[in-house]
Amino acid sequence: MNIKKYLALTRLGMMEKLHYRLGTFVTLFGNLIYLVLIYFLWKAIYASSGSDVVNGMTLNDTLVYLVLATALFNFLEVFLVWDMSREIQSGAIVLKLLKPMNFRSYSFWSYIGENVMSFFLTFLPTFIIINILTNGSIALSFNLLFFVVSVIMALVINFSIDMICATICLYTESTWGLNMVKECIVLLLSGASIPLAFFPEVLRKIVQYLPFRCIYDTPLSVLLQKPGYTFGTGLISTLALQLAWCIALTAIGCAFWSLSLKKITVNGG
Amino acid sequence: MNMNNMSVSVAKRRGLKFYLDIYRKILIQDLKSKMSYRADFVISNIGMIVSNLVGFVTFYILFQNFPSINGWTMYEMLFLYGFSLVALTPVQCFFDNNWNLRYAVKTGDFIKYCFRPINIFFYYISEVFDVKGLGQLCFGVGTLVYAWSHLAIPVTAATVMQTLLFLFAASLFMIAIMNFAAATCFWIQNSGYIMVIMFRFKDFAKYPASIFNSFFRIIFTFVIPIAFIAYYPSLVVLRPNEIPLLSWLSPLIGLLFFYLSYRFWLLGARKYDGTGS
């Protein structure tokens, strides 16, 4: 297949990301401040609980998990909903629709470029720093390989969810509220704000099968080698579930998009 | 004598009533244009409520695992959360136009505000009323009442008045912070990221400042006064036996801080000399 055209888009996305370096640094700074909050909050929480291990997680485990989740969030974040609504308002979307390439793959491959850049700019430094600070608590062996596989699938799932939301926006013509709902639900149900281990039993069982946890919880658990996520104890079935969601959401997203394409009303352009 | 009288009457007309009257007129125009996007109004408010609901669920899950945080029970934390939501409503509803300031300054649109014979800060800010804040207000009041009813705080005229007064004081801090952040665009081009960072600080408001170590507590009290959005003012109602001096002073500090941000904003506006187009 003609992969070259996709890689060209990816390169463009990478260059675009590099162009806005200041924004990246400000995001990093904002994160740093946010980590201060996470640190003090969970320190206070553990100090009041009286025991060192809660739900099988120590303070250190929780902090590593949440810090990496924040880094993962910045790495995976795509602004598809925002970009698309702006392009619809300005009419610029027409130019993308006219391209001899599927709009969905066009967006996907350009965002991938940005994601790759932010992986090196935000996630990797955070990972290295946290591993040094915790004296190498994260094992560096085959889990890294599975983590990469898992993260790529997380990326696809995240993009698909964004794409579905963006498509819904074609009907509602309102972006802010919908995006807010999406972001909050994803952050909560994926374990990015509280590790899933703390969820009440019933809720956790439900969340276990939803696609949201595949975005943050699954890659992180694989990376940190949580019980049930190592080779031989359920790694394969976890990755299989992720793959299933990958395919399902992509299929739903594609179908929904091509169905809704006729709906787009572009004011001018 | 006659001249004197006239200038007095002009000055009088420029009083509070004059500005309220203008605000009402601008507000009606703004709402009229907003009403043409009714679906957006509904969805935005749903978004606001869901995002706050998620915050509520987060607390619930946390307190399923831990009985208290730093000596704060779940209902006390919820009180703090509701308090911060209500205190953050005015900045959301009335001061949302600050977010557009950097575009107005960059494109040169800001010059139009310089030619009106009324207070430039007032005119600029009054132009937008953000309806999204109403969903947050409802949710915040609900949370506050829910927490209040579980905390056995007596409902007397005194406690209600105290709550209202300190809510008002608390709201001034976020308004002032955002005024400062927005006004930086008069000096630094495209300074939106300063606003974004400052706006993220509001997430800190719903936690008791006592969880931080002394260094960060000083920062969040005196440098970026986030602790005044909920922590210090709500102590007056929550812990009436051990109210720190800073809690009592928060209305005064709030007014002072707001005034300083207002002067800073005007300083920037006066420095503004258009884009030349």
Image: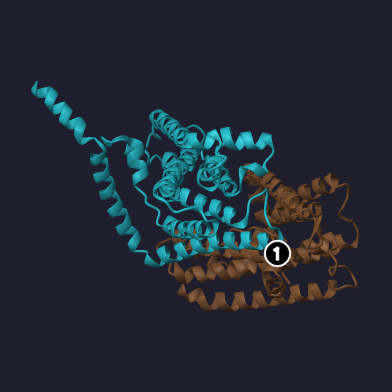
Chain colours: A brown, B cyan
Left or right? Give the position of B269 relative to B62: left
In the image as oriented, which residue stretches furthest toward the top? B1
Amino acid, disc 1: Leu
Residue B136 image offset from top left, x and y in percent: 47, 57
* Residue B212 occupies quadrant: top right
Classify mark 1: helix, strand or loop.
helix
- The correct choice, above or below, for A111 with respect to A209 in the image is above
Q: Residue furthest left?
A: B2
How far across and how far down the image is residue B185, in percent? 48, 37
Q: Would residue B226 be visible to someone looking at this image?
A: no
Q: Nearer the viewer, residue A83 or B239?
A: B239
Residue at (51, 71) in percent of width and height: A168
Using the rendered view, name the quadrant where residue A147 is placed.
Answer: bottom right
Residue A122 lies left or right of residue B258; in this view the side is right
Q: Where is residue B148 in the image (x, y as percent from the top left)?
A: 50, 56
Could you tell me if residue B9 is visible in this image? yes
Image spot of residue A133 (x, y percent): 83, 44
Instruction: Tell me how many marks there are.
Output: 1
Judging by the rendered image, the residue that carries numbered circle 1 is A155
Quadrant, the N terminus of chain B: top left
Host chain of mark 1: A
Whether residue A219 sits left or right of residue B183 in the image: it is right
Quarter of the C terminus of chain B within the rendering: top left
Question: Seen in the image, is A62 located left or right of residue A19?
Answer: right
Front position in the image: A139 or A158: A139
- Residue B95 lies, with reference to residue B253, above or below; the image says below
